Image (cartoon, rainbow, N blue to C red):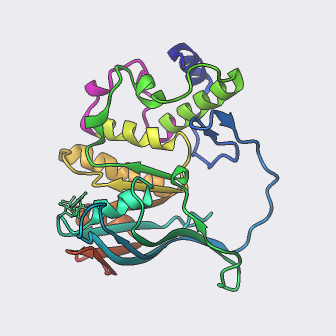
Amino acid sequence: MATSSLSTVQSSFNPKPLQPSPQRVSPKLNSIRIPQNHSVHCGYSCFEVKDVSYRPPGTELNLLNKVTFSLPERRQLFNPFGLIFGQSGSGKTTLLQLLSGINKPTSGSICVQRYGNDGNPDQLPEQLSPEKVGIVFQFPERYFVADTIADEVTFGWPRRKSSLQVREHLALNLQRAVNWVGLNGVSLDKDPHSLSGGYKRRLALAIQLVEVPDLLILDEPLAGLDWKARADVVKLLKHLKKELTVLVVSHDLKELAALVDHSWRMEIGGFLREELLPV
Ligand SMILES: Nc1ncnc2c1ncn2[C@@H]1O[C@H](COP(=O)(O)OP(=O)(O)OP(=O)(O)O)[C@@H](O)[C@H]1O
């Protein structure tokens, strides 16, 4: 993706709230999803984790033990924000790795279940596809590889053989994500490493928002930031909550408490239970 084509898009783009696009482009597939005719859906969906255990291959150690929880999927008027807290080494990141498809549970299921108006499941649960999950791991800026913001975001996108149409969609999606996280005032030619701590986190989020995920997961989004950047990221998360279902793992309970609708404590040994935040 040439930076010049992105700059062209940037100048003509009007900032607006991000809506999940029915024609999200998958760089992985190098193809465009054609908009479907929208049918009217009643009811709601939930991300459901049921009896998930995880034992790393070749070990006898259960890092997660029958973890079960559910988080309602984004709805028009309300987007749930979940927070998992607990002692270091209890298994929180391990759980996120399963949710994002990096590892597979040893047993149990991670699904999306649709419910009808009567509160009963109206179809079989669907396995949660990793493509529908955006994840920002701890200290994402440590993994920046490119010399410009544009290259950092478009890293891994199709460079050749993709049609102009695909590239235009990617550029629009990029610009939309950049606007959404408030990076639109920053030149896409800028070196990502020269950004402030808070803006680096914004960039890491923008990368995940190019294709609007159904579930956005953040591992310790405030870790390692100074007070100003922390406040900046909290404000951004409040903004994201208006549009997406967000699941966060964090030790920073006080700062995030106002955003949280559901919370769980992870106990050593990988035991999860629903618990109000102790703040
Ligand atoms: N592949 C592995 N093999 C064996 N043990 C592992 C493996 N991966 C992680 N662990 C161990 O599993 C436990 C849970 O790790 P995890 O990173 O999920 O904890 P956490 O709750 O996220 O901790 P923190 O809050 O410090 O980030 C830790 O004791 C860790 O050392």
Asked if residue 219 is positioned above or below residue 168 in the image, the reply reads: below
Q: Nearer the viewer, residue 271 or 35?
A: 271
Asked if residue 26 is positioned above or below residue 105 in the image, the reply reads: above
Total numbered labels:
0
* Residue at the outermost top position: 4
Residue sitting at x 54%, y 31%: 175
Give the percent coordinates (x, y) of residue 260. Answer: 38, 68
Q: Nearer the viewer, residue 96 or 197?
A: 96
Q: Nearer the viewer, residue 152 or 128?
A: 128
Residue sitting at x 66%, y 80%: 121
Task: Please say whether residue 201 is one of the residues in the magenta stretch.
Answer: no
Give the percent coordinates (x, y) of residue 241. Answer: 47, 58
Q: Say whether residue 184 is visible.
A: no
> Within the image, what quadrant is residue 214 found in?
bottom right
| Left or right, 149 with reference to 174 | left
Q: Say whether residue 118 is visible.
A: yes
Quadrant of the drawing holding the N terminus: top right
Dominant secondary structure of the residues highlighted in magenta in the image: loop
| Left or right, 192 with reference to 135 | left
| Left or right, 36 with reference to 176 | right
* Residue at the outermost front position: 58
> Within the image, what quadrant is residue 12 found in?
top right
> Within the image, what quadrant is residue 164 found in?
top right
Residue sitting at x 73%, y 72%: 42
Q: Nearer the viewer, residue 60 or 86?
A: 60
Give the percent coordinates (x, y) of residue 98. Answer: 40, 61
Asked if residue 95 is positioned above or below residue 136 in the image, the reply reads: below
Task: Please say whether residue 185 is one of the residues in the magenta stretch.
Answer: yes
Residue sitting at x 58%, y 27%: 171
Residue numbers of the magenta segment: 179-197
